[in-house]
Amino acid sequence: MLSRTADHLYWMSRCTERAENLARLLDVTYQMSLVPQTVDAEERNWGAILALNSLESAFAVSFDRVTAENVLRFMVADSHNPSSIISCLRSARENARAVRGTLTAEMWESINVTWLEMRTQNFDSILAGGVSEFFDWVKRRSAMTRGVTFGTMLQDEALSFIHLGGKLERADNTARILDVKYHVLRPNGDEETTDFYQWGALLRSLSAFEVYRKVYRDVITPARVAELLMLREDMPRSLRACTAGIARALDLVANAQSAETVRRAGLLSAQLRYARLDDIMAHGLHPYLTDFMDSIFDLGERINSDFLATAS
């Protein structure tokens, strides 16, 4: 496959996944903001979204206060913010258009219609119609695109690069959300009820609330949340499931220069497969997740170098 084609497929998948992940996080944060809380707690919760995406400085250029409306406007409909939902959906469509001949008709139609519908909306209309309804729409469109992709695409290298981009983006997102929950959103001296709602919100942002109840059948605890989102391969958005998917996709597209990338992906997957939560907690969750995100970034850089059009 031409590296240019692989590049567009990879980033099309990453941008679609990023838009969905952002919609999930914003929706849960918005729902939690409806629960009575202090002004400081609300600012901390919305500020955590900016910290999650390393956008504090970019946000400060346009807004002087961290409020729900300002963060939503910046992260949903600001076309100058490359990480906003509108920017992600536009980028996904542009990448898809560049390789339209590689995609099935159903897949192109799903991505194109998503962008055309997004383009007709602005933040004021989204606010008037209900932000949760908008976030549900983003998640449905992403699910539809994913469904027609895996239901109609030939099982070849093109699909492997789509898998690769989506799994890499999802792994990074899960790690960032979990890290922020432990070290940014978690106030000191929380009451148990408040803690339950916060951990429940984290699980919902990753479609893991019902899964948690099915697996553990008990109260929500930080340790079990960490175990579910990191070490269970049967949880679709867990770090272990994502890294296993990355390793499989890289095996399928391996070339003469990708041996080290394949090895590092396999090593990262094996570390999560055989990891124990007690050992991770003893080492420190934040350092572990930081190392994991560094590894994901390294894999992304190596994938660019080994396969994509950005290779030197």
Image (cartoon, grey):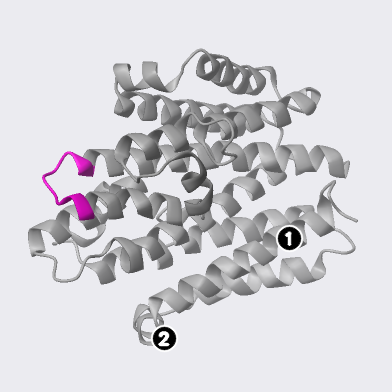
* Extent of the magenta region: 32-40
SS under mark 1: helix
* Earlier-in-chain disc, 1 versus 2: 2
Provide the residue designation for mark 1: 301
Q: How many marks?
A: 2
Q: How far from the left and from the top, in percent, is residue 299?
A: 68, 63
The amino acid type of the residue labelled 2 equals His
Which residue is disc 2 drawn over? Answer: 283
Mark 1 residue crowding within 10 angstroms, few (<14) / some (14–19) / many (20+) = some
Q: Label 1, label 2: how many angstroms apart (C-alpha)? A: 27 Å
| Local SS, label 2 | helix
Taking 157 as reference, is 39 left or right? left
Residue 288 vs residue 125, the one in the foreground: 125
Q: Kindly identify the amino acid type of the residue bearing the numbered disc 1.
A: Glu
* Quarter of the picture holding the C terminus: bottom right
Quarter in which the N terminus is drawn = top right
Counting from the top left corner in percent of width and height, residue 186 is at 26, 64
